[in-house]
Image (cartoon, helix red, strand yellow):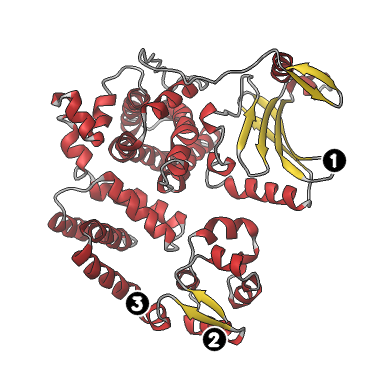
Amino acid sequence: MKYIDLNKSVYDLVGEYPELIDIMSELGFTEIKKPAMLKSVGRFMTIPKGAKAKGIDMIDIILALKNNGFTFDGPSVDENMGAKPSQQLGMHVDEAGKDDEATRRKELIKSYLLRLEDESQLEAVRADFVKNFESVDAAEIMAAEEELIKEGMPVSKIKKLCDIHSSLFHGMSVEEIHGAGANGISLEDKRANKKEFAAFYKTIVGHPISTFSKENECAAKLIESFLADPRPEVLAKLSDLSIHYAKKGDLIYPLLDVKYGMFGPSNVMWTVDDEIRDGLRDLRKSYDEAKAIEVVNRAKEMIYKEENILFPLCAANFTDEDWNGIYFDSKDYDLAFGVDETWEGAVKAEQGDIDFEAEVKMPGGVLKVKELIALLNTLPLEITFVDANDINKFFNEVPKVFKRPAMALGRDVFSCHPPKIEPMVRAIIDDFKSGARDKVEVYMNKKEGDFLVTYLALRDRQGTYLGTMELVQNMDGIKKHLGL
């Protein structure tokens, strides 16, 4: 007999029974045939959650699977088909209230977020929130968002809720309530309660949170100036937000996701950052006052989210090693709003012993390690190598337009890309692995010039896939030579 556990993810079930791809596709789960979707969304999507999201009757799914020789394990079919979302929510809250206070709080927060799909409910939800909570932990908000994503709510909807819900929690987070008194707490007490470290880190000149917060202070002043006098020349001064967001995207979100399993910020806040940055770019090309005010208000709200949710979340989890890595990698970026700080206590990670005189023997000759390093660093290219397991293994040491923080080495390549780019990266690498393609070229126009980005599949002499190489080449010299 072939058993289906309805608690398992679609990805895991397809791994056990590949024939499910055709069966589920015919039922309306067409995305299951897309490898990138199966490997990403499929890892947390279950059949019942997918049915709910798609509006497909579980009875039809059960009958189709039974007709194909499957039987069922896990939750009863009636449980997965019968209860309405509101009933399911109430059931979970009741059970959690008996067993786990943390789970009860999370389910309540989820219910508030779901009610905020109707924006007119904001004040009613706020009243209920005040009745049930004296305060809320920033991590609790993130956990509730992440669980809604796991349950199948589209990231785009979470992102919209994110814009609304921050106004719900204004002034109610633990970090806001206790943060103001953080400077009066001894260092020992701060170490005992890491969530108050965010306020403490702001007092350390050059610490990443200090620098990020000073950038926010500068941006906040410019935002208030613009809202008081919404002219394009005032808006132009906010362009450095793109640098601030780029640092967050490269240095903070992937670390929270990969090392600490907190994918909510990378899925939601990173998307909002990109939309604000794109909005500011579009406004530089064609100014529209109403649109500008909307974009700037989103940037203002993001400052609140960083200061009261994101930074305390990082402070509660990141180690000294993490912060040191962020500090040194951030030096590769342009200054944002002129904030230039030195962290006197920063300690650079040791690279380990390298035998620079060791020889590397290859079919084309022999190079010492120091010669090979010099060769790769002298090529007029930015070089990235991702191995066959999708892990970042090598960046050459040249000034980069496309930043490659040292912290990203040894990390999953997909985590280093914003949500809107990740599907494209997955598609390219999947094609390289399958042999469908060996090369992809993308031309990009950046403020630094025009660039050709080339992705190449690396294979051994037997054709086995070894990894992907990315080359970034500045095309300005070539264009000038050709008179273009």
Quarter where residue 52 is shown: bottom left
Residue sitting at 47 percent across and 45 percent down?
271
Residue, disc 1 = 461
Residue, disc 2 = 63
Visible in this render: residue 288? no
For the residues marked 1 and 2, what is the alpha-carbon distance in whole angstroms?
49 Å
Q: Amino acid at mark 2?
A: Leu
Marks 3 and 1 close (CB-CB < 8 Å): no
> Which label's residue is closer to the chain start, 1 or 2?
2
Relative to 102, residue 271 above or below:
above
Camera-side residue: 397 or 443?
A: 397
Residue 84 - label: 3
> Which label's residue is closer to the chain start, 3 or 2?
2
Q: Amino acid at mark 1?
A: Arg
Relative to 394, residue 133 above or below:
below
Quarter of the figure that contains the C terminus: top right
> Residue 187, image x and y in percent?
20, 24
Residue sitting at 26 percent across and 20 percent down?
203
Residue sitting at 27 percent across and 31 percent down?
198
- Tell me if mark 3 has few (under 14), some (14-19) or many (20+) residues whose alpha carbon lies within 10 angstroms of its own: few
Camera-side residue: 140 or 297?
A: 140
Image position of 90 (left or right of 387): left
> Which label's residue is closer to the chain start, 3 or 1?
3
Quarter where residue 117 is shown: bottom left
Relative to 202, residue 439 above or below:
below
For the residues marked 3 and 1, what is the alpha-carbon distance in whole angstroms?
57 Å
- Tell me if mark 2 has few (under 14), some (14-19) or many (20+) residues whose alpha carbon lies within 10 angstroms of its own: few
Visible in this render: residue 380? yes
